[in-house]
Amino acid sequence: MFEQILNCIESYDTIIIHRHKKPDGDALGSQIGLKNLIKDNYPQKRVLCVGDASERFGFMEDSIMDDVSDADYSGALAIILDTSAKALISDERYTMADRVVRIDHHIFCEEIAEIEVTDTSYESCCGLITALAMECGWKLSPLAAKSLYTGMITDSGRFRYDSTSSQTFRLAAFLMEQKFSTEDIYRNLYTDDFRFIKLRAQFVLKIQICEGGKVAYIYTTREEAEGYEADSFTLSRGMVNTMGEIRGVEVWVNFTEAEEGVLTEIRSSVHNINPIAKKYGGGGHAKASGATLKDREEAMQMLSDLKDVTEGRI
């Protein structure tokens, strides 16, 4: 599956790795993991990572991005990870590279690169990168393994989501052959400062249940968002699952006003909500997708569409 990707990696001396904006554990884990896999197996190559920073996942080793100039892209290979659409890629300079490839596990939205490996049967992009390492027979360092395992945990919801399969556990077992601390990963992922515990409590009090009881949502205005001591990633993706365990709720959505628009995170335990996300310019997975909307009015239109999904009208 990865033969063309491997040929590209072996053909270029400089490789620059991109992923989506506002990175989660899978985006950073696959980026850091692939960087170190290439460095471990091709030490003569120059491998760089670019993109915006993440406060939430700043605990991950090697998560500080490299200082990359425009000149670095000359004659370089750009690899796009964990990204379904061009608008979501962090740092648009990938277009300046000599060649672009993509590895992704989201539902296909549009062609991004000349060579693409997209496979939705993987719970995470980290799973795909792990499969690449196994197929290529690459040696695996503890740092690469820990990074990939971190992303696998976050995108599978600690192996709880229905994207988790026997394949997931085979890949995880391969990573765990390396010596790294899973306790360190879980401690950083699932313990919080008291201020974030209080923040979640505030968001629980903001939950609204739509008529019919099947759709829940939270809407945070720009003024409210500026009053919280948290970045937009924490307020949007970080808070969406405060609604995830309400009995009877089949779809939940978190709207957060930000400079770039209304950040929208959609989740479902039952329905494929991806077509709704795509309708509004977003994408993702069947039961976990996102989009950036224009304003509150468009957010309420989306909410109406999601209610229709739960009632079988869409």
Image: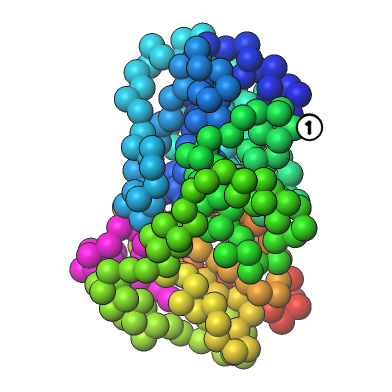
Kind of residue indicated by mark 1: Met
Residue 23 percent location from the top left of the image: 44, 48
1 or 208, nearer to the observer: 1
54 or 249, nearer to the observer: 54
The residue located at (58%, 34%) in the rendering is 140
Task: Decide whether residue 230 is among the magenta residues.
Answer: yes
The residue located at (41%, 14%) in the rendering is 72
Quarter-of-image position of residue 78 = top right
- In the rendered image, the vertical position of residue 211 relative to residue 15, given as above or below: below
Task: Answer left or right for 93 relative to 198.
Answer: right
Q: Secondary structure at mark 1?
A: loop
80 or 15, nearer to the observer: 15
- In the rendered image, the vertical position of residue 241 relative to residue 202, given as above or below: above
> For the C terminus, which image quadrant?
bottom right
- In the rendered image, the vertical position of residue 255 relative to residue 123, given as above or below: below
Residue 179 percent location from the top left of the image: 52, 46
The residue located at (47%, 39%) in the rendering is 143
- Residue 262 seen in this snapshot: no
Task: Answer left or right for 264 relative to 314.
Answer: left
User: Would you call the spot at circle 1 few (<14 residues within 10 Å), some (14-19), or many (20 or more)?
Assistant: few
Q: Say which residue label 1 marks.
A: 1
- In the rendered image, the vertical position of residue 47 relative to residue 301, given as above or below: above
Task: Answer left or right for 28 relative to 222.
Answer: right
Q: Which residues are magenta?
A: 218-238
Residue 4 percent location from the top left of the image: 73, 22
Quarter-of-image position of residue 234 = bottom left
> For the N terminus, which image quadrant?
top right
Task: Decide whether residue 55 is among the magenta residues.
Answer: no
Residue 286 percent location from the top left of the image: 69, 61
